[in-house]
Image (cartoon, grey):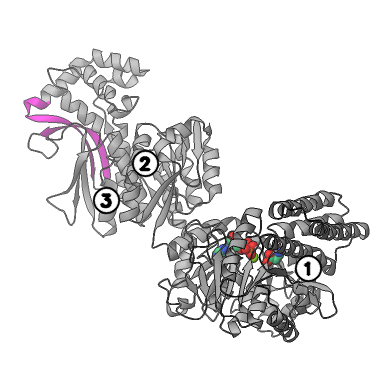
Amino acid sequence: MQVLKFGGTSVGSSKNINRVITILENYATKDKVICVVSAVGGITDKLLKAGRLAQKKDEDYLSEYKTIKSIHLKLLLDLVPSKNKTISKTIEDKLKQLKELLDGIYLINELSPQTSDKLLSFGELLSSFIITEALKYKGVNAKRKNTQDLIVTNSNFTKAEVDFETTNLKIRDYFNESDYSITIVPGFISKSSKGEITTLGRGGSDYTAAIIAAALNVTQLEIWTDVSGMYTANPKLVKHAFPIERISYQEAMELSHFGAKVLYPPTVQPVLDLNIPIHIKNTLKPEAAGTIISNENNNKTNIATGITNINDIALLTLQGNGMVGVPGFSKRLFEVLAQEKINIILITQASSEHSICFGILQSDASAAETAINTVFEHEISIHKIDPIIVELNLSIIALIGDSMKNHQSISGKMFSTLGKNNINIRAIAQGASERNISAVIAEKDVEKALNTIHERFFEDNNKQLNVFITGIGNVGEKLIDQIEQQHEFLKKNLKLDVRIIGLANSRKMVFNAKGIDLKNWAAQFHHADKSTLEGFFEKATQLNLRNSIFVDVTANEAVSKMYAGYLKNSIAVVACSKIACSSDYKNYKHLKDLSLKYNTPFLYETNVGAGLPIINTLNNLVASGDKVTSIQAVLSGSLNFIFNNFNDHTNFHDTVKRAQFEGYTEPDPRIDLSGIDVARKMLILARENGGTMDIDAIENESFLTKANLESGSVDDFYKTLKKDEAHFQALYANAKAKDCQLKYVAEFKNGKAKVGLQEIPNNHPFSNLEGKDNIVMFYTQRYPEQPLIVKGAGAGADVTASGLFADIIRIGNN
Ligand code: ADP
Ligand code: ASP
Ligand code: MG
């Protein structure tokens, strides 16, 4: 004998029922088949909804009933098109009984647990009838047997307990006699020893199948559903979850108890005692291997087996000084909860005994609150303990696996992963079996928590980075191109999956939580929403994706003011704008502190020398205990370009114009020529070296004339350059006379920094700087005479984008 169970989706449409029939016909060629079926997908919920509406005197129950009726009539018509009168009459009678029951509930506005069971039983009664008729219509030797004649329970309505002795006898008697090749039985429903209709609890068809499989001691129980087995996590929430090939009964029980809906928790017990394996299979993909639950060959390579979640949890805390060292508090607490039939899902108690904290279903919270406050009324009135504290909208997530007990630091790994993603843990419980580590978190964080833990424990360390870019000028575009180009390489070689989730410029913004298609991002951008800085921030935080990174590719002060908010939400910040780091010291320090406090990177390598590893080198020197004694640098690509091309054959005005035309200067060239840009870079280096100074501490003696400096607009500025050509030629001639070149140099020594134009001898390392090159020489205790030199192109969209990209990758490797 073979026992197969098909769930709601498997029998949810005529197409799927035909798949079921094909599977059954195939099995029937080998041995007799007992097939347990659920109600048609969604019908149990609809029945319950109709009942509740009727109870509330809401006439919408009639439209709910109509939907239920038409779904079943349509299925029958599709599957048994012969319009056989007896069949039609049977189903219409059944539907009529259902209608009468609903009308009755409406009339007396009462929906007791007993009536609710009666109401819900219609789902499985109808589905099993239709499927049997569909089989018979195809000429299969099939029969329906109502499980209410076989499964006997107590009168614990909505979740009745089975009287196994009587039930097993009835099942054996019936099936040993029956010679139908396929018997269809409704799952979930049963009868009490007094003859009342009962049910086995929501999701209980799995249990029905296990009861029959155990009573007949079959070799295997098959549960056919809409996914290819028990997954490492709910596949609807975790895209990278995958089916577990083999799993122990104990693990399957833990997973299902802690939310893996694919198996109704009590299902395991009857078959476990007899060592009957459960095979979970996919009706929509019968060729998939599925999951085998048994106690054999469960050698797994993963330490953890799966991760689950239960939503709608309330956390209750009983606390007070009067509890310390006084026995009996927990007894009274749990006794009153038991009296109220409230199930406790998780408990923790600090060893100080000052508080007990436990998780229950949110729907039980208000009953629990009243009952507990009543029981401890006296202690509360004399302030020995506080009234019970109730927190709502929480979830439990649980990491489960038999092998976890043999490994250290699993909980450390789990909680640090949550911490890094700014997921606050409200309570923790680990069973002594060490098969389960549970944490209570906010419900809004569940998806992120499951995905990030899944990534850490199950995904071969593949790490997803979710990038939000603001500013899509030259550099932004190059960055997008580079990310697209390197995507596969990074995945393969660094196990980083870099995805761009949000893109914005000052006008528009687009998002795609699954990653924007980078091949045609510009087209998507075309139809994008209007952008605001707050809107972009809100969306990034609300998406709540793990390893989120905000990238600022603007030169906009308002954007830099958003960094603190991102860091506080554990969203890393990568900035090419140097506004934040060169703003007042208090602000710079605040951002650095937030980065430390929230364990969230704030990186800005491109602030100095574009893609050159200048800040990173300095950070490494400092971190490794070296002392930087002085820094000498040429940090302006634009000034370098200008002084490389300015001589007695050219003129200063045209050279500056050309630099601007080639994109080496800021839109306002005065920012470069006044030295302010170099001063800001120097300030950032000084701060990275431990300095606490502000910009006015950087000495800046300008080589420009008073007229240049006081010019009103950019155009005016160019006019003054033309007028003052003689001044610039004199600077050039003086240097040439000494065999020197003009270089704009930044210096840091003895805690003091200055920037300015210098005459550099022809044999100096600065002298042979080409085009837009930057150079930085670090003199340190470990590099006292020959400095550590970083040199290369210090401006340009490509290298700036690659510097930003390097920061993003650094965060990924962290
Ligand atoms: P059926 O109607 O066949 O009994 P259920 O809806 O009760 O199906 O259970 C299957 C569903 O369980 C899946 O569609 C999936 O959404 C959910 N689920 C939750 N956790 C898991 C998990 N770890 N593995 C597989 N499915 C899971
Ligand atoms: N139809 C019932 C429910 O939805 C039982 C089941 O499908 O297992 O809960
Ligand atoms: Mg189910």
Q: Is mark 2 within 8 Å of ligand 1?
A: no
Is residue 29 visible to the viewer in this orientation of the structure? yes
In the rendered image, the quadrant that contains the C terminus is bottom left
Q: Which residues are magenta?
A: 735-762
Dot 2 surroundings within 10 Å: few (below 14), some, or many (20 or more)? some
In the rendered image, the quadrant that contains the N terminus is bottom right
Magenta includes 664?
no
Residue beneath disc 3: 618
- Secondary structure type for disc 2: loop
Q: Nearer the viewer, residue 544 or 177?
A: 177
Residue 433: give x, y in percent of width and height.
Answer: 53, 81
**Disc on res. 367:** 1
Magenta includes 737?
yes
**Disc on res. 694:** 2
Dot 3 surroundings within 10 Å: few (below 14), some, or many (20 or more)? many
Q: Label 1 is placed on what type of residue?
A: Ala
